Amino acid sequence: MPISFDVAIVGLGAMGSSAAYHLAGRGLKVIGFDRFDPPHVWGSSHGKSRMIREAYYEHPLYVPFVRRAFELWGDLERVAGGPALYRQTGGLMIGPEWSSLVQGTLRSAVDYDIPHERLSATEVHRRFPAFTPLEEMIGVLEHRAGILLSDDIIRAHLALAADRGAELRTNEQVLGWERVEGGVEVRTASGEVGARFVVLSAGAWLEALLPDLPLPLTVERQVIHWFEPARFPEYHEPEQMPVSMWQLANGQLFYTKPDTGDGVKFGVHRGGRTTSADAIDRRVSESEDAESFDLLRRFVPFAKGSIRARATCMYTNTPDTDFILDRHPDAPEVLIVSPCSGHGFKFASVIGETIADLVCTGESRFDLSPFGISRFSSRVLPST
């Protein structure tokens, strides 16, 4: 098997498209595969927009990554030369003061000196009248947060990767891979391709590509709604409605994004049904509509108009909800990237750059040990 490429990428969604862009930008010969034609609605990266926030409630270790991601999103906008890919709205994290959402946000903000404001429920409603938090809730406002236009970003990454010489094969499913002399052979329905390195960024389809490496991943079905505001549409415009996340006393999390032309976006974060990439139910039930209506009625009441659109997507979760970004323990030429547990899109730019660093130099500017596979087992990875 001749080694015809430096890198083969399996999956061209958020992470794979970014990897293709950065690797091709380093002058490497890149080939990418996707079983669909990205951006598409079958995986985890669609839905028109994604949130980006700096005071990261999940863990402060993500803050350096998201800061670099902000820089790279700006670079991508300049290189692409088209409409804006990021829109700053500010971000509000709302919940009881003791909630993990509020406490985690404050921890990251303090640890990294991120400008922020702490607002009472009354102050939240006065400044942002779309929101009606409960009296016992508080809000943490950070000004840099905003919206990433996910579909446009994937298109930009792929178009620029192709301009830089990457060969992108869409609607071509990868069936498997194996190590060969000098690299890895990737097998598709159309034949075999040899590359020095392989990047597996197939999201919910990852496990099928790793039959001999059982990873503790679960695929979770998520539902998204877009609503036409019932009253006061100006309250829901980006100038008056920051992106928001909410945590209720029972632990439930949901999020909103302002109306940028498609309606107010609303989704429950986590708690969806376990499924698989090929068996997910794409229909949205009346009870799921009702749950969204009820949460809006209580906390974003003027947004509770007619439903403009519905969609489903998938979170591919690790047990600790942190990412996987590591080499295969038995095949160091294979980089396993992506299962991002439903909070990864904002990092796609920096993860693509990190993959390029690992391929080109074997090193990263970041400590990647929290994202290692070895945390799931006693197996020790080769040194990178």
Image: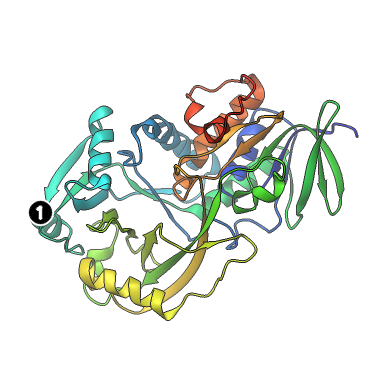
How packed is label 1: few (under 14 Cα within 10 Å), some, or many (20 or more)? some
Name the quadrant of the C terminus.
top right
Name the quadrant of the N terminus.
top right
Query: Residue 209 at x, y = what percent?
Result: 71, 46
State whether residue 129 is above or below residue 326: below
Query: Residue 358 at x, y = what percent?
Result: 61, 25
Instruction: Tell how many labels.
Output: 1
Outermost residue toward the front in this view:
378
Query: Residue 189 at x, y = what percent?
Result: 84, 54
Outermost residue toward the right in this view:
1
Query: Residue 261 at x, y = what percent?
Result: 39, 66
* Colouring of the image: rainbow
**Left or right position of 122 against 21:** left
Q: Nearer the viewer, residue 126 or 94?
A: 94
Residue bearing mark 1: 123
Q: Nearer the viewer, residue 161 or 255?
A: 255
Residue type at mark 1 is: Glu
Is residue 43 among the parts visible in the rendering? yes
Is residue 45 among the parts visible in the rendering? no
**Left or right position of 119 against 179:** left
Q: Quadrant of residue 167?
A: top right
**Left or right position of 125 against 193:** left
Q: Quadrant of residue 60?
A: top left
State whether residue 193 is above or below residue 235: above
Local SS, label 1:
helix
Q: Residue at x 22, y 38 (%)?
A: 106
Q: Nearer the viewer, residue 135 or 47?
A: 135
Q: Residue at x 57, y 48 (%)?
A: 156
